[in-house]
Amino acid sequence: MKYYAHTATLPDGANDPNTERCSLLESQADRELIWYIQYLSHQTGGLMAVAGELMAKRSEQSPQALADYLRELCLNPATSLTMGPNCFPNLIKALRQYRAHLIETKEASVFTTELGRKVFEVLDYTAYGRGLTLIQGDARLGKSHAARTWCELHPGNARFVEVPTGNDEATFFRDLARGLGLGNFLNYKVVQIRERVESILRSGDIMLVLDEAQRLWPQTNIREGYPKRITWVMTMANAGVPIGMISTPQFFVIQKVVEKNGWNSSQLIGRLSLYESLPQDLSIEDLVGVARAVLPEASNDVLRALAVYARSSARYLAAIDAIAKRARYTAMREGRVVATANDVRKAMQESVIPADTKLFRALERGRNGKADKLLPVATTLSNRASDKPLMVV
């Protein structure tokens, strides 16, 4: 078997080297470790960042040598998975511990809403049943964030890909290739990119999570368009690839339009092993939890005010994030690290609320031809620059 050093420069007809590497491993744990290294290779800093962390207590060694070894470990079937290099003999054990630590750290830092728990449950079942599932919910409630977080909690097992807009296959398969860590394939034909993508998915080791799945349907000439992306997803599902689709309610709206060109929807519906419709709203308690996750230094009163405001904002969860970032920006400009309640008040009343009001007016103008009401604001903050300057009314 020939070993290719870079996945993006494979000659025609060659399989992905990660897939070739894993095909020789009987142990699921070993295959998972290889895919995890491949996952790390296309995160920020790549394998050099990983090597640097692993070698932090070995100052006499260069992280570059370890990064090169990790690359060999990931791609070259001749590299042993029972021991590490002379400079790091317990590397394999250290890598497994490194992965476990990152997962534990992520779990400890994540606040999961009730909606997020439903997303987790469906994706857990998707991985277990190795089927095709569909999660549908309104925008702005955090379903995409939950799905991405689930994938981050399963590094080496799952890949998160946002389905691109448009109808062309090239963009679709390039985004899949990028999400799988294969590169951009800018100079490759669609059929070549597709072969690379399918060689990984058909290995059976990776679960695919497709966000914005309503874009799998044709987005122009819908009545005449053939759903090539949907058909491909069904083909992969038939091959035993676990796929979780995350969508807005537009999914079934577009499907009904496509049905008018004679396409048989039962082909898709019959392949769905589970469908989940998400709640249309989040509780105040969940919103407080989200606010605490993005602004942990805030008091309980401030967090509750953010939650109340988020429910009235056209941006919902994004409003909490916008307020937190604006408050921290204000603190940073004044030479402080921690944002106070007064920073939050300024962020809400002087920046985010005016911006949201303009957005709401624009939305109303688009719906009714005029702006007939203002964005409701249920939260009032006092002007005192202290940690307790807030009142919810």
Image (cartoon, rainbow, N blue to C red):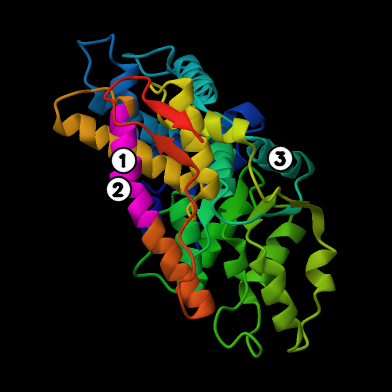
Q: CA distance from mark 2 to mark 1?
A: 5 Å
Coordinates of residue 385 in the picture (x, y in percent) = 26, 24
Residues under numbered marks 2 and 1 in contact, where contact means CB atoms less than 8 Å apart: yes
**Around disc 2, counting alpha carbons within 10 Å, would you say few (fewer than 14), some (14 to 19), or many (20 or more)?**
some
Label 3, residues with CA under 10 Å away: few <14, some 14-19, many ≥20: some
Residue 348 belongs to magenta span: yes
- State the residue at coordinates (14%, 25%): 335
Residue indicated by mark 3: 118
Q: Please, is residue 120 above or below residue 7 in the view? A: above
Between the C-alphas of marks 2 and 3, the distance is: 34 Å
Q: Nearer the viewer, mark 2 or mark 3?
A: 2
Amino acid carrying mark 3 in the image: Lys
Residue 217 appears at what percent x and percent y? 63, 73
Residue found 45% across the figure and 62% down from its top:
360
The answer to whether marks 3 and 1 mark residues whose Cβ atoms lie closer than 8 Å is no
Q: Secondary structure at mark 2?
A: helix
Is 131 left or right of 181, judged from the image as shown?
right
For the residues bearing labels 2 and 3, Cβ distance under 8 angstroms: no
> In the rendered image, which residue does mark 2 sit on?
351
Q: Is residue 177 above or below residue 286?
A: below
Q: Quadrant of residue 252?
A: bottom right
Q: Residues within 10 Å of mark 1 (few under 14, many from 20)?
A: many
Work out whether 220 lies above or below 87: below
Name the residue that disc number 1 marks.
Answer: 347
Instruction: Give the camera-side residue of 89 and 354.
Output: 354
Q: Amino acid at mark 1?
A: Ala
Q: What span is colored magenta in the figure?
A: 342-356
Quick one: 150 or 32, which is closer to the camera? Answer: 150
Circle 3: element type = helix
Q: Nearer the viewer, residue 306 or 155?
A: 306
